[in-house]
Structures are given as structure tokens and as C-alpha cells.
């Protein structure tokens, strides 16, 4: 993949600041933009920087619409391990986003399959996502699209890979408590975003990043589909970029 799409920055804090700046620039340029947002360890610093920029600049967020990538099946906004809780504590409760405009799949839906259809409909009604931010799993997943996911996949219920459950167990009391299923945007939803920003920090992400962007496009490495996106930016800190070649 063209190396020009990959921005290598010094460390995690630089990655966070650069990503936050890209997000705020889109909001300032298009006050009714649609954002796709991730959760996890990687974007935590980005949300910190973004919160500060938004509040310092008194940025109008009343018309910004957000869609999260995924949520665990079985967890709701009051569960500390849910992505809903994460978004509220990291960003939404600290900034002026309108609750009516922020969307996260409902992990507590009685019928998760029906919830996927509803989420897909909402996404369609919003029009194209202007900027979608994703992290990358050590197994190359984006959102919860685990290895083997169809490039044409849309919002759906997925089984989490054991590697993913084990890594995410750090947020739960035990591995047993980590949900086995999640609702995620599919790879096709991600590819339909006008612009995609992938952020990665730390040594542990280096092999996945290299497989995604130096290797062949393969359903075994879901992030590799992004090589086919025509407006992709990767922001990697030096450690995460350590295995990439030019
Ligand atoms: P992390 O997750 O930011 O917690 O490493 C990234 C991902 O799995 O997409």
C-alpha cells in the first residue's frame, strides 16, 4: 500500500493529538457531519484530546451525528464494561454532543438480529459517514469483524474470537464474564465511509499493522480491506509502525 497513507508519529500522545485534530477539523468544516467511532484502549487518549479541543473551542456539536462501531450483546449503558458506558464516560458526558444524535447498537435488545436491522436503517438514513475512526486488533480485526469476516458484511451479530475475548478480559472480572457475541458494523459499512482513519499505538500492534498494510488483501486479515479504500489515513506511533516496510 502507498506509504503516503501512513503517518508515523512519535508516541501514543502524538497519535492521540493528531487523530483528535483530524476529527475536530471535519466537525468545523461540516457542522452536520456523521462520525463513526471506536472504543478500546487505543482511542482513549484521542477522546481526551478531542474533549479538550471541543470544549476550549466551544464547538457547536448540535448537528454532529455519531455511530459507534460495535457493542457487546448482553451489556447496556449501566454496565461498566459496555462500549456505551465507555463512550458516555470518555466523551459524551464531557462534551455537548446531542444525545439524540449519538448512536450505539443496543446490546440489551431482546432480539439482537432485529437490532442490527434497526442500526443498519439508521445508518442508511444518516447518509454516508464522513469520517470513521477505527483501531486494529492484534488479530487484524476492525470493529468486531474477526478474521474470516466477509468483505461484504454489514451490521450483524458476530461470535468473538477467543483471542479477542482473552485480550478484552482485562476489563472484566474473569474471562468467563466476557460476552461471546457482539453487534458490529460490517466491513462493507466501514468501506462505505467517505474517509477512514485507523489509529494504532504500541509494539503489540506492529505485527497486525504490517500484515494489514504490507501483506495481501485477505479476509484472514480484516483490516487489509482498507488497502482498497480511496481515502484512508493510518496514524501509527513509532512502536506500532515498527514492522512496516516502505
Ligand atoms: P484496543 O482495541 O484499542 O483496546 O487495542 C483495538 C481493537 O480491538 O479494535
Image (cartoon, rainbow, N blue to C red):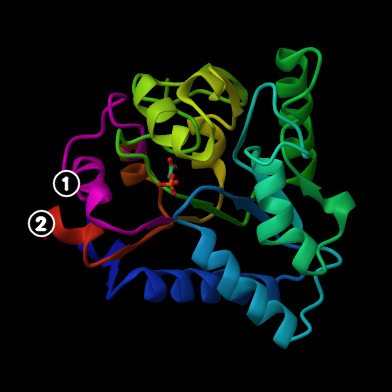
Tell me which corner region of the image, top left, top right, bottom left or bottom right, holds residue 23: bottom right
* Residue displayed at 39% across by 28% down: 166
> Under 8 Å from ligand 1: the CB of mark 2?
no
Measured as percent of width and height from the top left, residue 93 is found at: 79, 61
Mark 2 and mark 1 in contact? Answer it, CB < 8 Å: yes
Seen in the picture, residue 79 relative to 14 is either above or below; the reply is above
Measured as percent of width and height from the top left, residue 221 is found at: 29, 31
* Residue displayed at 65% across by 79% down: 52
Q: How many marks?
A: 2
Measured as percent of width and height from the top left, residue 125 is found at: 80, 39
Which badge, 2 or 1, comes first in the chain's sequence? 1
Residue that numbered label 2 is attached to: 245
Specify whether 235 is left or right of 126.
left
Examine the structure image and report whether residue 70 is included in the region drawn in magenta: no
Specify whether 36 is left or right of 22.
right
Tell me which corner region of the image, top left, top right, bottom left or bottom right, holds residue 236: bottom left
Q: Which stretch did the figure color magenta?
A: 198-223
Q: Secondary structure at mark 2?
A: loop
Q: In this orientation, does residue 29 appear?
A: no
Residue that numbered label 1 is attached to: 214
Seen in the picture, residue 91 relative to 188 is either above or below; the reply is below
* Name of the residue lying farthest toward the bottom: 56
Q: In this orientation, does residue 154 appear?
A: yes
Specify whether 81 is left or right of 17.
right
Amino acid at each position: 500500500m502507498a506509504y503516503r497513507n501512513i503517518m508515523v508519529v512519535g508516541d501514543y500522545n502524538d497519535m492521540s493529538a493528531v487523530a483528535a485534530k483530524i476529527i475536530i477539523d471535519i466537525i468545523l468544516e461540516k457542522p452536520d457531519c456523521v462520525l463513526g467511532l471506536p472504543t478500546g484502549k487505543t482511542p482513549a487518549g484521542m477522546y481526551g484530546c478531542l474533549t479538550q479541543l471541543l470544549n476550549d473551542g466551544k464547538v457547536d456539536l448540535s448537528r454532529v451525528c455519531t455511530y459507534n462501531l460495535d457493542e457487546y450483546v448482553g451489556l447496556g449503558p449501566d454496565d461498566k464494561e459496555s462500549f456505551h458506558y465507555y463512550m458516555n464516560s470518555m466523551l459524551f458526558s464531557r462534551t455537548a454532543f446531542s444525545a439524540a444524535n449519538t448512536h450505539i447498537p443496543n446490546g440489551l435488545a431482546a432480539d439482537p438480529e432485529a437490532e442490527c436491522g434497526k442500526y443498519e436503517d439508521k445508518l442508511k438514513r444518516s447518509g454516508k459517514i464522513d469520517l470513521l475512526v477505527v483501531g486494529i486488533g492484534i488479530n487484524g480485526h476492525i470493529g468486531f469483524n474477526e478474521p474470516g469476516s466477509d468483505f461484504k458484511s454489514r451490521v450483524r451479530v458476530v461470535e468473538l474470537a477467543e483471542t479477542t475475548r482473552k485480550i478484552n478480559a482485562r476489563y472484566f472480572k474473569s474471562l468467563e464474564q466476557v460476552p461471546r457475541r457482539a453487534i458490529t458494523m460490517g466491513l462493507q459499512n466501514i468501506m462505505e465511509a467517505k474517509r477512514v482513519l485507523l489509529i494504532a499505538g504500541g509494539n503489540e500492534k506492529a505485527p497486525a499493522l504490517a500484515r494489514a498494510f504490507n501483506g495481501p488483501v485477505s479476509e484472514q486479515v480484516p483490516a487489509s480491506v482498507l488497502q482498497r479504500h480511496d481515502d484512508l489515513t493510518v496514524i501509527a506511533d513509532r512502536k506500532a509502525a515498527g514492522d512496516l516496510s516502505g
